[in-house]
Image (cartoon, rainbow, N blue to C red):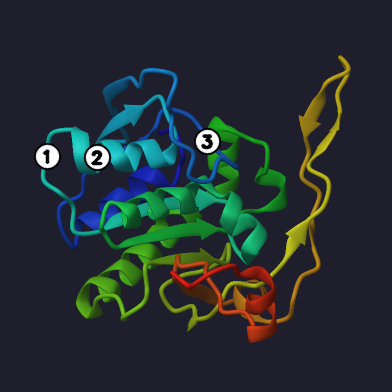
């Protein structure tokens, strides 16, 4: 709830309709679509920069489930997740992202959703509070305008058949005049995520993406454009007949 992108995004979206804000009470990165099962969730009504919000002691997906099914209020027409500080482009980040996870939870609730993520200066990573906000400067307001413009267009045209949600990644210097490209997810992986810690434990230390295929959302953002990526959440795929014969037993379901 302390993200510097939150209040600007809510205000920008509010120009186009009513906005209800339900967010984790602290950062929940690299958590994908995790749902809290063994701990009770606390919901506290709070305010940030004049924006009223519900702060949840859980994951981004928890927030969506609570907002849609449990907390008082009308069912939303669209779920907007983000703007995440850091890009969620490429398959490795996409599958790991709590920002994307919230949009997936919206899909499971039968709602359209769009997740926004933005590049930030390298020296802003790892910072919090006033230091991070100072480095980001007016970027958070400009990016909020871009996100609201994308949402406006999505509400106007609706989702194309087969599209379950959108992931939108923005260059750090994006503004409303920045080119927008509808693209695909770049296939990629990452290497080691943990390094030995001082007490014989292991600490999360992400290094870099590897095995990056050409094209897709990574190349789009690297070229300075906003990457708008439609996603279908059906992961099934057809396999050749010789594989099917080898694997199947009995009749097909």
Rendering quarter of residue 230: bottom left
First of labels 3, 2 by sequence position: 3
Instruction: Tell me whether circle 2 and circle 1 mark residues in contact (CB < 8 Å).
Output: yes
Across and down, in percent, residue 14 comes to 21, 54
> 32 or 225: which is nearer to us?
32
The quarter of the rendered structure image containing the N terminus is top left
> Would residue 43 be found to the left or right of residue 209 on screen?
left
> Would residue 190 be found to the left or right of residue 180 on screen?
right
**Labels in figure, total:** 3
Say if residue 219 shows up in the picture.
Answer: no
Rendering quarter of residue 47: top left
On screen, 219 above or below 39? below
Alpha-carbon span between mark 2 and mark 1: 8 Å
* Residue position marked by numbered label 1 in the rendering: 73
Mark 1 is surrounded, within 10 Å at the Cα level, by few (under 14), some (14 to 19) or many (20 or more) other residues, namely few
* Residue position marked by numbered label 2 in the rendering: 67
User: For numbered disc 3, what is the local secondary structure?
Assistant: loop
């Amino acid at each position: 709830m302390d993200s510097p992108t939150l209040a600007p995004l809510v205000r920008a979206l509010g120009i186009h309709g009513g906005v209800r804000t339900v967010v984790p009470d602290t950062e929940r990165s690299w958590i994908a679509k995790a749902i809290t099962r063994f701990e009770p969730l606390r919901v506290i009504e709070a305010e940030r920069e004049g924006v009223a919000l519900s702060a949840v002691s859980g994951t981004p997906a928890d927030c969506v489930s609570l907002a849609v099914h449990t907390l008082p209020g009308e069912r939303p027409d669209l779920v907007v997740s983000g703007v995440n500080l850091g890009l969620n482009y490429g398959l490795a980040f996409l599958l790991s992202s709590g920002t994307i996870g919230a949009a997936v939870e919206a899909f499971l609730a039968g709602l359209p959703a769009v997740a926004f993520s933005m590049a930030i200066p390298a020296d802003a990573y790892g910072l919090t509070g006033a230091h991070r906000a100072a480095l980001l400067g007016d970027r958070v307001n400009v990016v909020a305008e871009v996100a609201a413009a994308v949402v406006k267009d999505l509400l106007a045209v609706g989702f194309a058949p087969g599209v379950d949600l959108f992931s939108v990644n923005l260059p750090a210097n994006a503004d409303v005049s920045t080119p927008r490209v509808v693209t695909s997810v770049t296939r990629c992986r990452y290497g080691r995520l943990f390094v030995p810690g001082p007490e014989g434990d292991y600490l999360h230390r992400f290094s870099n993406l590897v095995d990056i295929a050409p094209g897709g959302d990574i190349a789009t953002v690297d070229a300075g454009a906003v990457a708008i990526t439609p996603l279908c959440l059906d992961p099934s795929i057809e396999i050749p007949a010789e594989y099917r014969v080898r694997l199947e037993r009995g009749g097909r379901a």
